[in-house]
Protein backbone atom coordinates (compact mmCIF):
# COMPACT_ATOMS: atom_id res chain seq x y z
CA UNK A 1 0.00 0.00 0.00
CA UNK A 2 1.34 3.46 -0.98
CA UNK A 3 -1.34 5.85 0.22
CA UNK A 4 -3.86 5.89 3.06
CA UNK A 5 -6.35 8.39 4.48
CA UNK A 6 -7.09 8.11 8.20
CA UNK A 7 -10.19 9.71 9.74
CA UNK A 8 -10.05 10.63 13.45
CA UNK A 9 -12.90 12.10 15.53
CA UNK A 10 -12.71 15.19 17.73
CA UNK A 11 -12.64 14.49 21.46
CA UNK A 12 -13.62 16.25 24.64
CA UNK A 13 -11.48 15.38 27.66
CA UNK A 14 -11.99 15.51 31.44
CA UNK A 15 -15.85 15.80 31.37
CA UNK A 16 -15.64 17.87 34.56
CA UNK A 17 -14.05 15.84 37.39
CA UNK A 18 -12.32 13.20 35.22
CA UNK A 19 -9.12 15.20 34.78
CA UNK A 20 -6.64 13.44 32.47
CA UNK A 21 -8.83 10.31 32.60
CA UNK A 22 -12.28 10.69 30.97
CA UNK A 23 -12.87 11.44 27.30
CA UNK A 24 -15.54 11.20 24.65
CA UNK A 25 -15.35 11.15 20.85
CA UNK A 26 -17.51 13.73 19.07
CA UNK A 27 -18.79 14.22 15.52
CA UNK A 28 -16.15 16.51 14.00
CA UNK A 29 -13.32 14.93 12.04
CA UNK A 30 -9.73 15.29 10.93
CA UNK A 31 -8.81 13.39 7.75
CA UNK A 32 -5.10 12.91 7.12
CA UNK A 33 -3.66 11.34 3.96
CA UNK A 34 -0.19 9.77 3.99
CA UNK A 35 1.58 8.94 0.73
CA UNK A 36 5.02 7.37 0.85
CA UNK A 37 7.64 8.92 -1.43
CA UNK A 38 11.33 8.19 -1.97
CA UNK A 39 12.60 11.24 -0.17
CA UNK A 40 11.61 14.37 1.79
CA UNK A 41 8.60 15.69 3.70
CA UNK A 42 5.71 17.67 2.23
CA UNK A 43 2.78 18.74 4.43
CA UNK A 44 -0.27 20.50 2.96
CA UNK A 45 -3.68 21.56 4.22
CA UNK A 46 -2.49 23.36 7.35
CA UNK A 47 -0.96 26.73 8.21
CA UNK A 48 2.66 27.19 7.14
CA UNK A 49 3.76 27.22 10.81
CA UNK A 50 2.55 23.62 11.24
CA UNK A 51 3.94 22.30 7.93
CA UNK A 52 7.40 21.32 9.24
CA UNK A 53 8.96 18.20 10.80
CA UNK A 54 7.43 18.99 14.20
CA UNK A 55 3.90 18.51 12.81
CA UNK A 56 2.25 16.06 15.23
CA UNK A 57 0.99 13.75 12.46
CA UNK A 58 4.57 13.45 11.21
CA UNK A 59 6.19 13.02 14.63
CA UNK A 60 3.85 10.17 15.58
CA UNK A 61 4.24 8.66 12.07
CA UNK A 62 8.01 8.60 12.63
CA UNK A 63 7.67 7.33 16.21
CA UNK A 64 5.66 4.30 15.05
CA UNK A 65 8.07 3.53 12.20
CA UNK A 66 11.01 3.79 14.62
CA UNK A 67 9.28 1.51 17.07
CA UNK A 68 8.70 -1.03 14.26
CA UNK A 69 12.38 -0.65 13.26
CA UNK A 70 11.14 0.35 9.79
CA UNK A 71 13.00 2.72 7.49
CA UNK A 72 11.62 6.29 7.45
CA UNK A 73 11.49 7.29 3.79
CA UNK A 74 9.81 10.37 2.31
CA UNK A 75 6.14 11.13 2.90
CA UNK A 76 3.48 13.53 1.64
CA UNK A 77 0.92 14.42 4.29
CA UNK A 78 -2.34 16.21 3.52
CA UNK A 79 -4.55 17.39 6.39
CA UNK A 80 -8.25 18.26 6.14
CA UNK A 81 -9.62 19.15 9.54
CA UNK A 82 -12.99 20.29 10.86
CA UNK A 83 -11.66 20.34 14.43
CA UNK A 84 -10.92 23.88 15.65
CA UNK A 85 -7.24 24.21 16.59
CA UNK A 86 -6.13 24.96 20.17
CA UNK A 87 -9.72 25.04 21.46
CA UNK A 88 -9.91 21.94 23.70
CA UNK A 89 -11.53 19.60 21.15
CA UNK A 90 -8.62 17.23 20.61
CA UNK A 91 -7.08 18.63 17.41
CA UNK A 92 -3.55 17.66 18.54
CA UNK A 93 -4.58 14.18 19.65
CA UNK A 94 -6.32 13.68 16.28
CA UNK A 95 -3.05 14.39 14.44
CA UNK A 96 -1.05 12.09 16.73
CA UNK A 97 -3.58 9.29 16.24
CA UNK A 98 -3.70 9.80 12.46
CA UNK A 99 0.09 9.73 12.15
CA UNK A 100 0.45 6.61 14.27
CA UNK A 101 -2.30 4.74 12.45
CA UNK A 102 -1.15 5.96 9.03
CA UNK A 103 2.37 4.61 9.56
CA UNK A 104 1.06 1.33 10.93
CA UNK A 105 -1.35 0.76 8.03
CA UNK A 106 1.23 1.66 5.36
CA UNK A 107 3.67 -0.89 6.82
CA UNK A 108 1.24 -3.79 7.05
CA UNK A 109 -0.60 -3.28 10.38
CA UNK A 110 2.05 -4.90 12.53
CA UNK A 111 1.13 -3.02 15.69
CA UNK A 112 -2.08 -3.29 17.74
CA UNK A 113 -4.22 -0.22 18.56
CA UNK A 114 -3.03 -0.61 22.17
CA UNK A 115 0.57 -0.40 20.92
CA UNK A 116 -0.26 2.79 19.01
CA UNK A 117 -1.94 4.22 22.11
CA UNK A 118 1.15 3.42 24.19
CA UNK A 119 3.40 5.31 21.77
CA UNK A 120 1.16 8.36 21.38
CA UNK A 121 0.45 8.51 25.11
CA UNK A 122 4.19 8.74 25.77
CA UNK A 123 4.23 11.71 23.37
CA UNK A 124 1.13 13.54 24.68
CA UNK A 125 1.61 12.73 28.39
CA UNK A 126 -2.03 11.80 29.13
CA UNK A 127 -4.45 9.42 27.36
CA UNK A 128 -7.79 11.20 27.86
CA UNK A 129 -8.12 12.56 24.31
CA UNK A 130 -6.12 9.80 22.61
CA UNK A 131 -8.21 6.91 23.95
CA UNK A 132 -11.60 8.05 22.58
CA UNK A 133 -9.88 9.18 19.36
CA UNK A 134 -8.62 5.60 18.87
CA UNK A 135 -11.58 3.67 20.27
CA UNK A 136 -14.59 6.02 19.88
CA UNK A 137 -17.39 6.58 22.42
CA UNK A 138 -16.99 7.42 26.10
CA UNK A 139 -13.75 6.21 27.68
CA UNK A 140 -11.98 6.27 31.02
CA UNK A 141 -8.25 5.63 31.10
CA UNK A 142 -5.61 5.09 33.74
CA UNK A 143 -1.86 5.03 33.35
CA UNK A 144 -0.28 2.17 35.25
CA UNK A 145 3.46 1.46 35.18
CA UNK A 146 3.70 4.07 32.44
CA UNK A 147 1.19 2.34 30.17
CA UNK A 148 -2.39 3.49 29.43
CA UNK A 149 -5.30 1.17 30.15
CA UNK A 150 -8.67 2.20 28.67
CA UNK A 151 -12.25 1.01 29.07
CA UNK A 152 -15.37 2.14 27.19
CA UNK A 153 -18.52 3.09 29.09
CA UNK A 154 -22.13 2.98 27.82
CA UNK A 155 -23.95 6.21 27.04
CA UNK A 156 -27.66 6.99 26.95
CA UNK A 157 -28.61 7.59 23.27
CA UNK A 158 -30.39 10.93 23.79
CA UNK A 159 -27.49 13.08 24.97
CA UNK A 160 -26.64 16.10 22.86
CA UNK A 161 -23.29 17.80 23.23
CA UNK A 162 -23.28 21.52 22.51
CA UNK A 163 -19.73 22.80 22.12
CA UNK A 164 -19.46 26.54 22.68
CA UNK A 165 -16.32 27.48 20.77
CA UNK A 166 -14.90 30.99 21.25
CA UNK A 167 -12.96 33.10 18.77
CA UNK A 168 -9.83 32.95 20.96
CA UNK A 169 -7.39 30.10 21.69
CA UNK A 170 -5.84 28.74 24.90
CA UNK A 171 -2.73 26.57 24.42
CA UNK A 172 -2.92 23.43 26.56
CA UNK A 173 0.56 23.94 28.07
CA UNK A 174 -0.52 27.35 29.41
CA UNK A 175 -3.76 25.92 30.79
CA UNK A 176 -1.74 23.16 32.52
CA UNK A 177 0.78 25.61 33.98
CA UNK A 178 -2.11 27.27 35.84
CA UNK A 179 -2.72 24.11 37.91
CA UNK A 180 -1.31 23.53 41.39
CA UNK A 181 1.28 20.78 41.92
CA UNK A 182 -0.59 19.42 44.95
CA UNK A 183 -4.20 19.21 46.14
CA UNK A 184 -5.84 18.80 49.51
CA UNK A 185 -7.52 15.48 50.38
CA UNK A 186 -11.04 16.98 50.33
CA UNK A 187 -10.60 18.06 46.71
CA UNK A 188 -9.27 14.63 45.69
CA UNK A 189 -12.28 12.95 47.35
CA UNK A 190 -14.63 15.46 45.74
CA UNK A 191 -13.33 14.65 42.24
CA UNK A 192 -13.21 10.87 42.74
CA UNK A 193 -16.80 10.73 43.97
CA UNK A 194 -18.15 13.16 41.38
CA UNK A 195 -16.27 11.37 38.60
CA UNK A 196 -17.90 8.01 39.37
CA UNK A 197 -21.32 9.71 39.28
CA UNK A 198 -20.59 11.36 35.92
CA UNK A 199 -20.08 7.96 34.29
CA UNK A 200 -23.32 6.56 35.77
CA UNK A 201 -25.33 9.68 34.90
CA UNK A 202 -24.11 9.55 31.29
CA UNK A 203 -25.11 5.89 31.10
CA UNK A 204 -28.57 6.44 32.62
CA UNK A 205 -29.34 9.68 30.80
CA UNK A 206 -29.94 11.31 34.19
CA UNK A 207 -29.59 15.03 33.50
CA UNK A 208 -30.15 16.12 37.11
CA UNK A 209 -27.47 13.74 38.42
CA UNK A 210 -25.09 14.77 35.63
CA UNK A 211 -25.56 18.48 36.38
CA UNK A 212 -24.57 17.88 40.01
CA UNK A 213 -21.80 15.36 39.30
CA UNK A 214 -20.14 17.37 36.54
CA UNK A 215 -18.33 19.72 38.90
CA UNK A 216 -14.64 19.79 39.54
CA UNK A 217 -12.01 21.05 41.98
CA UNK A 218 -8.85 19.91 40.17
CA UNK A 219 -8.65 22.10 37.05
CA UNK A 220 -11.70 24.22 36.18
CA UNK A 221 -11.42 26.64 39.14
CA UNK A 222 -7.80 27.40 38.15
CA UNK A 223 -8.51 27.86 34.46
CA UNK A 224 -11.72 29.82 34.33
CA UNK A 225 -10.06 33.21 34.77
CA UNK A 226 -8.23 32.60 31.46
CA UNK A 227 -11.56 32.20 29.64
CA UNK A 228 -13.64 35.33 29.09
CA UNK A 229 -17.40 34.89 29.72
CA UNK A 230 -16.85 31.55 31.60
CA UNK A 231 -19.00 32.38 34.64
CA UNK A 232 -21.79 33.93 32.58
CA UNK A 233 -21.99 30.91 30.24
CA UNK A 234 -21.81 28.42 33.12
CA UNK A 235 -24.68 30.29 34.80
CA UNK A 236 -26.76 30.28 31.62
CA UNK A 237 -26.26 26.56 31.03
CA UNK A 238 -26.74 25.40 34.60
CA UNK A 239 -29.92 27.44 35.13
CA UNK A 240 -31.30 25.88 31.93
CA UNK A 241 -31.05 22.48 33.69
CA UNK A 242 -28.18 21.12 31.56
CA UNK A 243 -24.73 19.93 32.65
CA UNK A 244 -21.72 22.17 32.09
CA UNK A 245 -17.96 21.64 31.91
CA UNK A 246 -14.81 22.91 30.31
CA UNK A 247 -13.90 20.87 27.21
CA UNK A 248 -10.40 19.52 27.85
CA UNK A 249 -8.10 22.39 28.81
CA UNK A 250 -10.49 24.85 27.14
CA UNK A 251 -11.34 27.39 26.01
CA UNK A 252 -14.33 25.54 24.49
CA UNK A 253 -17.18 25.15 27.00
CA UNK A 254 -19.46 22.15 26.86
CA UNK A 255 -23.18 21.86 27.52
CA UNK A 256 -24.59 18.33 27.81
CA UNK A 257 -28.37 18.03 27.61
CA UNK A 258 -31.28 15.86 26.48
CA UNK A 259 -33.39 18.92 25.64
CA UNK A 260 -33.55 19.29 21.83
CA UNK A 261 -34.73 22.92 22.09
CA UNK A 262 -31.84 24.08 24.27
CA UNK A 263 -29.44 24.96 21.44
CA UNK A 264 -31.78 27.59 19.97
CA UNK A 265 -32.58 29.05 23.40
CA UNK A 266 -28.87 29.25 24.28
CA UNK A 267 -28.00 30.93 20.98
CA UNK A 268 -30.68 33.52 21.56
CA UNK A 269 -29.50 34.31 25.10
CA UNK A 270 -25.72 34.15 24.61
CA UNK A 271 -25.17 37.63 23.08
CA UNK A 272 -26.76 39.32 26.10
CA UNK A 273 -24.31 37.74 28.61
CA UNK A 274 -21.04 37.46 26.62
CA UNK A 275 -18.29 39.82 25.50
CA UNK A 276 -16.66 37.48 22.91
CA UNK A 277 -17.94 35.66 19.82
CA UNK A 278 -19.06 32.10 20.66
CA UNK A 279 -20.07 29.56 18.03
CA UNK A 280 -22.46 26.83 19.21
CA UNK A 281 -21.72 23.47 17.54
CA UNK A 282 -24.36 20.76 18.06
CA UNK A 283 -22.43 17.46 18.18
CA UNK A 284 -23.24 13.85 18.87
CA UNK A 285 -21.12 11.08 20.32
CA UNK A 286 -19.03 9.31 17.67
CA UNK A 287 -18.90 5.62 18.51
CA UNK A 288 -16.38 4.75 15.82
CA UNK A 289 -12.78 5.60 16.61
CA UNK A 290 -10.02 6.30 14.11
CA UNK A 291 -10.56 4.42 10.86
CA UNK A 292 -9.28 4.04 7.31
CA UNK A 293 -11.28 6.31 5.01
CA UNK A 294 -9.47 5.47 1.80
CA UNK A 295 -6.44 3.44 0.73
CA UNK A 296 -4.68 2.38 -2.46
N1 LIG B 1 -6.62 16.53 30.46
C1 LIG B 1 -5.97 17.55 29.67
C2 LIG B 1 -5.98 18.86 30.43
C3 LIG B 1 -6.73 17.69 28.37
O1 LIG B 1 -7.03 19.18 30.97
O2 LIG B 1 -4.97 19.53 30.49
C4 LIG B 1 -6.04 18.62 27.43
O3 LIG B 1 -5.23 17.93 26.56
Image (cartoon, grey):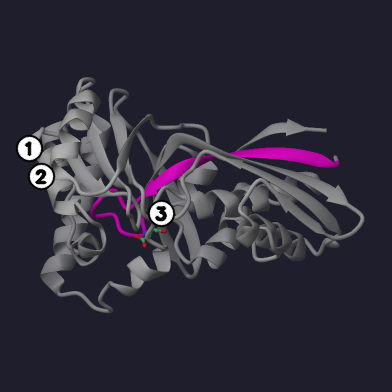
Give coordinates of residue 252: x percent, y percent.
Answer: 32, 48
Farthest-out residue, top: 261
Of residue 109 and residue 9, the one placed in the foreground of this image is 9
The quadrant of the rendering that contains the C terminus is top right
Quadrant location, the N terminus? top right
What x and y, as percent, mark residue 185? 14, 72
Closer to the N terminus: mark 3 or mark 1? Answer: 3
Residue positioned most to the bottom: 181
The tag on residue 288 is none
Q: Are marks 1 and 2 in contact (CB under 8 Å)?
A: yes
Which residue, given by chain and number where applicable, does mark 3 sit on?
141
* Residue 200 visible in the picture: yes
Residue at image position (23%, 20%) is 260
> Which residue is label 2 attached to?
235
Q: Nearer the viewer, mark 3 or mark 1?
A: 1
**Magenta stretch containing residue 17, yes or no?**
yes
The residue tagged 1 is 239
Magenta residue span:
2-21
Cα–Cα span, label 3 and label 2:
30 Å
Figure quadrant, ligand 1: bottom left
Amino acid sequence: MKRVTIRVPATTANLGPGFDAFGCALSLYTDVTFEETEYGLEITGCDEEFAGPDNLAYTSYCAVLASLSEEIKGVKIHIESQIPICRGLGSSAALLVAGAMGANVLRGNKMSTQGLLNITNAMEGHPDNLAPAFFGGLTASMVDNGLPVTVNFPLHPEWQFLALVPDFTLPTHIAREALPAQYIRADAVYNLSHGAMVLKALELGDEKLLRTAMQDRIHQPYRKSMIADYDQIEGLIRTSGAAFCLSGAGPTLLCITRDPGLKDRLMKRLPAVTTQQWEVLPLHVEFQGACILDAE
